[in-house]
Amino acid sequence: MFFDRPDSGERAVLVNISLDNDGGGIDPREFEALVISAGGDPIALVTGHRSTPKARSFVGSGKLEEIEEILRAEDASLVIFNHSLSPSQERNLEASLKARVLDRTGLILDIFAQRARTHEGKLQVELAQLRHMSTRLVRGWTHLERQKGGIGMRGPGETQLETDRRLLRARIKSISARLDRVRRQRGQGRRARQRAELATVALVGYTNAGKSTLFNTLTDAKVYAADQLFATLDPTLRRLEVDNLGPLVIADTVGFIARLPHGLVEAFKATLEETREADLLLHVVDAASEDRDDNRHEVQAVLEEIGAEERPVLEIYNKIDLLEMQPRIDRDDEGRPYRVWISAEKKLGLDLVMQALAERLGADVMAQDVELRPDQAKLRAALYALGAVENEEFGDDGSAHLQVRLPRSDWERLISREGA
């Protein structure tokens, strides 16, 4: 929109440079999968190592020549770095390579823009894009920066740049206000669920771990699920009936990824609050992935960033059909489920997931038979108002025999209030 630079192309040269402070670097296979998810055609992968990035162009002159040779030989016009680049580095690289340059943040933003379906999702993506763009706006107007003096040489570059910055700030402010309203509406929904004593479970996990497949299988929903990164972007909530527990609300959320840009976390706060406020997190892990331990740690890092690290977690190790394993529940020293091994696609172990949910969320739920005298009609009405009565029979003396299920705190409050 604002940029005056070479036309983009789908044939892309990928650059993955390991750095001393990378902590092992970023998996180039995941990088290639990201590019494919964005609709790109990776034709070459340039690798290398540096102790620190070069300030001007991230890579050295030799590596720059190597990239340029591949661009010309393969007739490509797009270079994607598996790193975050500064605005000046992007600008200098484009000038040297005569090709469009995209960094990891821009690549993920592009995928998010393609995946957004709901109005809220599109607003959140636009907010992240505008914040990213605002730091890179200067490059688009270099052809107007004629400020070196001389009659007839004073161009409108600075004025135009300031105008666009003002427009960007106004748009960012507008979108932020609209997302604040979304956040308040979500908060009202959560409070309504809390008043109804409906527990909330949020699916979290590394992208492409199988969250949406599990969500669809448990709830008979039709959320888009595919073997690609960030197939799910917009959050979806469904009601789920669990035996020996009752109804709960389950939320499918956006997948996490290594080096998830901070701007995206900021933009998606309204969505990620469902995770932070959940009663239980189902952390879905691709059990067949070679990087499953690293991916678990990346998810934990994002949970810490959004303030959800203290939420109770039940791990769901998915895709056991690829490991030729049988479903099972792993329990801690107290006998509580902490991990369930399943295959959502093959529908293996789903009964164990429901059992584990009932055990983890049902600790404070009591189920018992209650006998009420005819003069305790007020207590009977209160139990019905809470939706706690599962069955009722009347005795010959007018007494009521009820089977009730409700949170223990509600029962104790009722008993105290009614003096029963």
Image (spheres, rainbow, N blue to C red):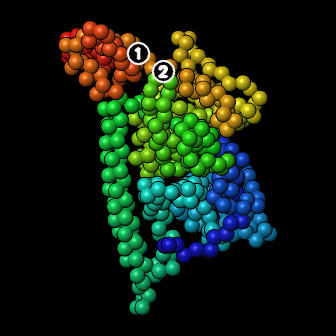
Helix, strand or loop at label 1? It is strand
Q: Residue at x 40, y 82 (%)?
A: 156
For residue 21, side relative to residue 392 (left or right): right
State the image quarter where residue 350 is shown: top right
Helix, strand or loop at label 2? It is loop
- 394 shown above or below 143: above
State the image quarter where residue 96 is shown: bottom right
Q: Residue furthest top?
A: 397
Q: Residue at x 62, y 19 (%)?
A: 330
Label 1, residues with CA under 10 Å away: few <14, some 14-19, many ≥20: some
Image location of residue 221, percent across then percent down:
54, 44
Label 2, residues with CA under 10 Å away: few <14, some 14-19, many ≥20: some
- 409 shown above or below 50: above
Image location of residue 416, percent across then percent down:
22, 13
Q: Residue at x 73, y 52 (%)?
A: 47
The answer to which of 332 and 250 lies nearer the viewer is: 250
Image location of residue 40, percent across then percent down:
68, 61
- Measure how far apart labels 1 and 2 are at the Cα level: 9 Å
Q: Are marks 1 and 2 in contact (CB under 8 Å)?
A: yes
- 131 shown above or below 190: below
**Camera sees residue 5:** yes
Q: Amino acid at mark 2?
A: Asn
Image location of residue 381, percent across then percent down:
25, 23
State the image quarter where residue 392 is shown: top left
| Residue placed under numbered mark 1 in the picture | 367
Q: Residue furthest bottom?
A: 152
| Residue placed under numbered mark 2 in the picture | 244
Q: Amino acid at mark 1?
A: Ala
**Camera sees residue 96:** no
Q: Looking at the image, tell me whether mark 1 or mark 2 is earlier in sequence order.
A: 2
